[in-house]
Amino acid sequence: MCLLLLSSCISQPSGRDVFRDVEVISIHNAVRDDVSFLDSIEIIPLDNGDNALLKEFSRFRYLKAQKMFLVIDSRQYVFLFDESGNYISSSDSCRGEGPHDYLMAADAVYNPYADVIEIYSPVGKGIVHRYDLSFRWLENRKLPYADPYIGARMDILDKDVYAFEPVRNDEEHLAIRTVDFTDSRSPRTEDVPLVQEGYVSTLTMMQKSFFRGDTALYFTPYYLDYHFYEYDLLKRRCRPIYELDLGEAITKSELDERLSDRKGSKELLWEKCEYLLSSKYLLPIIRLMDDSFVYACCIRERETYHLLHNRKTKKTYFLSPDAPLRMHRCYDLQDNVLATILFPYELDKYISETSKQYMSEETLEKLSEAKEEDNPIIIKYYLAE
């Protein structure tokens, strides 16, 4: 087995020069509190059947090409629903200690190359459990790690190639780990360094890391960073392509200096996040990207803001809490659809007379029938292209 470490031949450009030719998306040039970027809004209540009932959710993915939603709840069960919200299947019978079960689910993804659901468990050195769409077990892929490693996120980069974002317990060596199962008898692992200069803190929220476009693979690290990247599969390198200008920003070095009296604290990473959450900085805690749009959900003093940039028209929109339409933070972006998930008791915060103007009669009827105790509801914001 070949383990390629950070000292391998792969290197990541360093220094602030790496950001020299990056396109800047600025709130100073944005159209403020204008919702003309919206085409329509759809709500999709999820099935309330006994097999479909969710607890608090920890992951959400909209699989547009497959016409499915994938949700992981707090019990680490994986659920599949169709585009109408009908229950398809769940992994509730697969969680356990049996040979075809998974013990933990740190993440789950749909693999389009094999048409299977893959559940990543960090137990032992890590296992990828593969199931069909009815959660019938197919096989396990054991990760060939020679060192302790716990991933927080898993993505499929290519056929038989996976990427894992680690649980970050330090800030010194930023990397993702790739595993290539092309030769299943001798899978290869590699630590791919990220752009150290973009890192601010571990603060982030339930977002994907990789987004596949028609001609490019986009990447937003699972930590606070003001940048969007393109990932080169052949060179195994991240290239920054966009930088967010959200007004006054903060860097890791400035954050370290402000909390210098707490150095050595075991809770320092958490304390940095708490400091930022209470600060006046506008922080992009969710960053999504595809061929047409760039989206960031930002927070400042625990209030939510949204930035949307149309890559084709170069027009940028910025919504504050005072906007006539209050959007829920979005977790997935597919073509011209921003998608999110929330419980029905939260709907009143995000459904106004303005937002109802973007809904069809069918959607308004679904809205009127929603009950607070029901399963979560999907909101799809269709963007004008």
Image (cartoon, grey):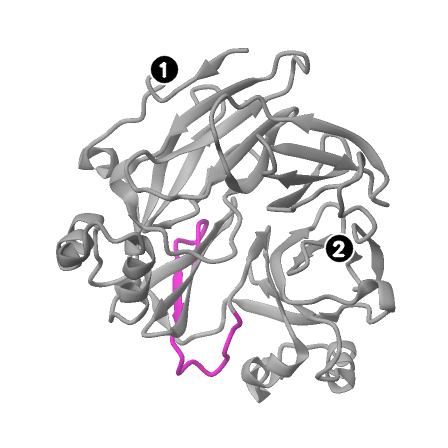
What's under tag 1, amino acid-wise?
Ser
- Any part of residue 237 in sight: no
- Residue 200 lies within the magenta run: no
Residue 383: quarter of image: bottom right
Does label 2 or label 1 sit earlier along the sequence? 1
Is residue 367 toward the left or the right of residue 286 in the image? right
User: 376 above or below 196?
Assistant: below
How far from the left and from the top, in percent, is residue 278? 29, 72
For the point 60% across and 50% down, the residue is 335
For the point 43% across and 75% down, the residue is 34
For the point 36% across and 15% down, the residue is 8
Q: Residues within 10 Å of mark 1 (few under 14, many from 20)?
A: few
Could you tell me which secondary element the residue under label 1 belongs to? loop
The residue at which mark 2 appears reads as 79
The residue at which mark 1 appears reads as 8
Q: Which residues are magenta?
A: 309-328
